[in-house]
Image: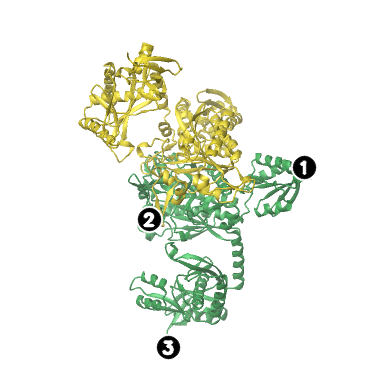
Chain colours: A yellow, B green
């Protein structure tokens, strides 16, 4: 008699199966629909292929392609399918790597010339053919020697480079479907027929390992979903996201530029970007003033000894720019503002009466990113950060932490950010003294305080156990733009280690020397990342208070030009950012031009308006609002700006 | 019969003298008073010793010690007198160099230990003794070999080092008085008795040649004047200047700090400095907005190729920080903002309709200064500059140039700067194509336009022929603080060369491609230099609009604390930068403390004020102003701030 095992499902129901059953067979036993839809299983907490044998009692979760786990496997398997198709069509192509990323996948190939749109079409067709062929996807477990042998025969030099880096006695997994084999940890779908709804999106150059000193490969991006509907929804989203791409809009709206001779990842803010920056800084200043922050300004370079003290040179050097030798001493441009703020804290003796001390600075930081990692304003090499460090007593911590969270919500409200999530990363006591700084009481107290604050205020957060920073718990803030694109904005961190490193102290109520807690925060992120987000969030249609050009005055003909100039002058004097289009074009052409520039308010003046001493107001997305006196217009628009609507 | 020569005086009168007459003899022939007061002569345009023989017809000017030229010689001769005294008192001392500087002189000595105040006293006494001895000061002309021989015997190693650098066949001058001989170009006074009114001021360490890798020497500063009255006036000025020293006040008032681990010359602005910076930036923004400037923001580092193009790497490298190698390419932190602004100009096709384009940025720059050259906020290694570049057509130049000058005057008025001078440096046509970029028409036109603008507007300027920059005429702006200390604030320059280097063009009215003119300007200088100046100008007593702390609320006793808190809260809400001293000290002590912090407005509240719902106002330098309602106080102070009184 065959051995029986007990399988426990997520709803805690149990079922007996013969030992050696596969997750796919279990799915089949439940129903043909599930068997069709399931893409991957979790057996005793481990993600695994559907065809793996279950030999003893187990907890089992079956994931269909519309779950987060299932979707990732589906994407990754589609990447393999694409690689197989490319190899069949372009026999000389060498495969590099092909991971799943946020709702998409890509694969890098070493080919003679870039892929054309026509190539992508052909690859897609071939993928469909391979999907219909219902090829089994089988895992193979290899020794390093075997793996090198297989991939050497295939002349897959990139795979061999990866294998060479693996320890000699480690086992290597590969996946095989038809004639195609790929190095991969898996898991994967059980058959190519499980991949039905996919689309190749685009192709672009990418350096091997993101390093511009390496060879330029050709990367194909694609996506896949578990249903036609989900695929189409995503393609529509991509279409909209493409229109809102901050790199495209940033250029069209003259917000920022890059220049080859300045360098990659170093944005230059054009005048219109300068306006947005100044409005954001004004908002931050007003908000921070009300919240009792003090603003400081610190130099952008420092002796290396400062970063030895802070630990940056030990833990963060690969993200720093190289040293400059000045008078025989190494100087670095700063990767973070923290050490400079700590120096200001330490410059004067502090008492509990001086705390909390909140030092804020829109500080410039410089981080080395590989050129292949650079991406528009989202991954840059120089950035200006809405930074602050709050030094407080343990007793003040909860209130200060909550105030920071509330500041986030305040900003979300102003910018119409409706969906956000705070990822609250906690320590694991087992890691104390190793992965985590050994301050058990501080960890417990601050984590509890922070959790209470988050709960009391009804803040949307998820806890991430054992993902804290070395020096304290942290919160990563994700936001979603108006069309649902996700952005990582900022990180808040509590730091237990820094006061010791920098000798920061205060005299407490009892006259004893004590160490302050330090909270890092940057709710408005960096100018680069936040304005990049805002461009996409608003699709370039900034609210009036933030719009680089708030309005334009459009005379209908020669006869109203003089009056138009007066209107323009008065709007300028009232503090609006307006322009005047006094060319001799037709009014319809002028309106069209202003629309293209996404200008929110048009003040149209013709002979009638001159007679009545009024202006005709036309608002973007709204249309004509009829005639008003200029005083009324100024009042209405001022209120709209004041309220940041 | 002896040869006769004709000597022409500044008033064009002529007089015959025997050939070989000395300037001193001519002075004696005019009168004993002049003979006593004269310190140096100019013969045919060359400054020369009074004892030099005049062999042929000559133009002669005799300078007394109260002229600029005479004073400089007097100072330099006093430096020699001091060195002679030091050598007599400290026989092991080695002399280094000892020039005259702005109304003072110094001399550096290599001695075993720093000079004490007592040493300075002794040196002064010895100087008086040597002055009374009426020693002749004689020029000696030496070959390099003779000079090395003399100074080797004296073991004057620093002099030898200087002599070694001189060309072998060049003649060397030295000056001798009594037993003392010093290497010197001269000229000098004819006798030590001409040096009567002097004072040694202080002593400090200074590296040989200002380089911290060299030995630390001891520098003694002193001063000398032609009359006791002038000396005393200057000593009083120094006394006041010492009280106002921005390094001293900056620390006391917590405006900025330096830190060893950050590095020399890299100021950290404390919160109170942050307030001043933000007020200045607000002023600049408002002023520039009205004047049609657009603000941009550019990264602080760039590929080297940008600075090759701009010429900085060729002409300015020793003032730049060393390169950072990023991905095999040299990057530099920027010494100036110009190239980045030019890149923004070049990013878009420009037409005459787009000009003038005025790009402004409070840009951060980094310049390498030797550590021995660093001085408080005046000579630093990182700075934030009130920079702008105006791109205009030649036809717009005069108006743009004048607008810049007027902006200076506007700022001078706001800051109560009563004495200024613009030094207008012009080209010399002989230098075209060599010392000056070869654009004869542009030189003539812009210099004339600028001169006309300066004249029309009655601006105080002096012309400096043949002192222009390579690429165009320039204006250096000097201002004097409230107590008459001179500061160099900023430089305005016109640049003919840059449009060519960066390919900057515009399409003119006729549809042809033309090169714009470029004006650099920075009327508010750098934050570092300007705030350093303001601290000394105001002696730390900033006008209300600029004051980091504008007021303080002082409750007289426990009984009025609650009301004081309300007053404090209302002042904060009204936007004032106020603090509250709610400790239990006596009111007189609280007032004294506030005075020490130079707080301008004190709002004192006791039981009477609580009853009457008023506050007692006490203003610094003015005293008690009696009781007012808080609403009145807020209105008065708001107006004072608004008007920047």
Q: How many marks?
A: 3
Q: Mark 3 belongs to which subunit?
A: B
**Residue A32 at x, y = what percent?**
36, 11
- Residue at label 1? B610
Q: Quick check: do tags 1 and 2 share a chain?
A: yes
Q: Dot 2 surroundings within 10 Å: few (below 14), some, or many (20 or more)? A: few
Check the residue under mark 1 and report the chain it is in.
B
- Marks 1/2 in contact by CB < 8 Å: the verdict is no
Q: Earlier in the sequence, mark 3 or mark 1?
A: 3
Q: CA distance from mark 3 to mark 1?
A: 100 Å
Category of crowding for the residue at label 1, using alpha-carbon neighbours closer than 10 angstroms: few (below 14), some (14–19), many (at least 20): some
**Quadrant for the N terminus of chain B in the image:** bottom left
> Quick one: SS at disc 2?
helix
Residue found farthest to the left: A153
Position of A555 relative to B231 (above/below): above
How far apart are labels 2 and 3 at the CA level? 58 Å
The residue depicted at 33 percent of the width and 26 percent of the height is: A186
Q: Position of residue B69 (x, y in %)?
A: 50, 70
Q: Are marks 3 and 1 in contact (CB under 8 Å)?
A: no
Q: Which mark is residue B315?
A: 2
Residue A364 image offset from top left, x and y in percent? 47, 43
Badge 2 and badge 3 in a common chain: yes
Point out which mark residue B644 bears.
none
Q: CA distance from mark 1 to mark 2?
A: 68 Å
Closer to the chain start, of discs 2 and 3, is 3
In this view of the protein, which residue sits in the foreground, A150 or B138? A150
Which residue lies under the disc numbered 3? B1
| Chain assignment, label 2 | B
Q: Are marks 3 and 1 on the same chain?
A: yes
A442 lies left or right of A234: right
Name the residue rendered at 41%, 60% in the picture.
B428
């Amino acid at each position: 008699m065959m051995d029986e095992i007990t399988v426990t499902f997520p709803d805690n129901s149990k079922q007996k199966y013969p030992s050696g059953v596969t997750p796919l067979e279990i799915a089949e036993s439940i129903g043909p629909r599930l068997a069709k839809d399931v893409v991957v299983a979790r057996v005793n907490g481990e993600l695994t292929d559907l065809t793996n044998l279950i030999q003893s009692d187990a907890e089992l979760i079956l994931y269909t392609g519309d779950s987060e786990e299932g979707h990732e496997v589906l994407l990754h398997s589609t990447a393999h399918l694409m690689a197989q198709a490319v190899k069949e069509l372009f026999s000389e192509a060498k495969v590099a790597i092909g991971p799943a990323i946020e709702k998409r996948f890509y694969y890098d190939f070493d080919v003679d010339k870039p892929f054309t749109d026509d190539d992508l079409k052909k690859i897609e067709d071939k993928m469909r053919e391979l999907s219909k062929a219902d090829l089994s996807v089988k895992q193979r477990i290899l020794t390093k020697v075997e793996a090198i042998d297989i991939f050497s025969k295939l002349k897959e030099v990139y795979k061999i480079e990866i294998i060479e880096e693996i320890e000699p006695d480690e086992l290597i997994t590969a996946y095989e479907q038809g004639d195609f084999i790929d190095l991969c940890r898996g898991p994967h779908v059980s058959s190519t027929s499980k991949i039905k709804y996919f689309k190749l999106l685009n192709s672009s150059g990418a350096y091997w390992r993101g390093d511009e000193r390496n060879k330029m490969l050709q990367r194909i991006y694609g996506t896949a979903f578990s249903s036609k509907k989900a695929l189409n929804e995503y393609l529509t989203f991509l279409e909209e996201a493409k229109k809102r791409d901050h790199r495209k809009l940033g250029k069209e709206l003259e917000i920022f530029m890059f220049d080859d001779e300045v360098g990659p990842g170093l944005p230059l803010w054009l005048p219109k970007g300068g306006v947005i920056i100044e409005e954001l800084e004004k908002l931050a200043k007003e908000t921070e003033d009300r919240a009792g922050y003090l603003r400081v300004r610190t130099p952008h370079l420092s002796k290396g000894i400062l970063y030895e003290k802070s630990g940056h040179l030990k833990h963060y050097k690969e993200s720093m720019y190289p040293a400059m030798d000045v008078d025989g001493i190494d100087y670095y441009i700063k990767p973070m503002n923290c050490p400079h703020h700590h120096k200001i804290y330490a410059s004067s003796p502090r008492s509990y009466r001086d705390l909390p001390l909140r030092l804020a600075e829109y500080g410039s930081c410089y981080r080395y990113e590989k050129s292949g990692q650079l991406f528009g304003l989202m991954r840059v090499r120089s950035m200006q950060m809405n930074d602050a460090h709050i030094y407080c007593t343990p007793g003040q911590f909860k209130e200060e932490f909550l105030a920071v969270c509330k500041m986030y919500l305040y900003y979300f409200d102003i910018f119409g950010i409706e969906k956000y999530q705070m990822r609250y990363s906690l320590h694991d006591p087992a890691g104390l003294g190793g992965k985590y700084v050994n301050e058990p009481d501080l960890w417990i107290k601050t984590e509890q305080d922070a959790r209470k604050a988050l709960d009391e205020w009804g803040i949307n957060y998820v806890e991430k156990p054992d993902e804290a920073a070395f020096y304290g718990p942290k919160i990563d803030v994700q936001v979603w733009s108006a069309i649902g694109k996700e952005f990582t904005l900022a990180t808040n961190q509590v730091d237990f280690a820094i006061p010791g490193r920098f000798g920061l102290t205060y005299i407490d109520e009892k006259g004893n020397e004590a160490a302050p807690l330090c909270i890092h925060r940057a709710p408005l992120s960096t100018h680069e990342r936040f304005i990049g987000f805002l461009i996409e969030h608003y699709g370039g249609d900034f609210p009036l208070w933030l719009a680089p050009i708030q309005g334009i005055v459009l005379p209908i003909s020669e006869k109203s030009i003089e009056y138009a100039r007066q209107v323009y002058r008065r709007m300028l004097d009232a503090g609006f950012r307006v322009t005047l289009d006094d060319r001799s074009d037709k009014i319809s052409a002028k309106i069209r031009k202003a629309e293209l520039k996404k200008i929110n308010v048009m003040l149209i003046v013709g002979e009638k308006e001159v007679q009545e001493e009024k202006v005709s107001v036309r608002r973007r997305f709204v249309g004509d609002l009829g005639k008003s006196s200029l005083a009324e217009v100024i009042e209405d628009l001022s209120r709209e700006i004041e309220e940041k609507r």
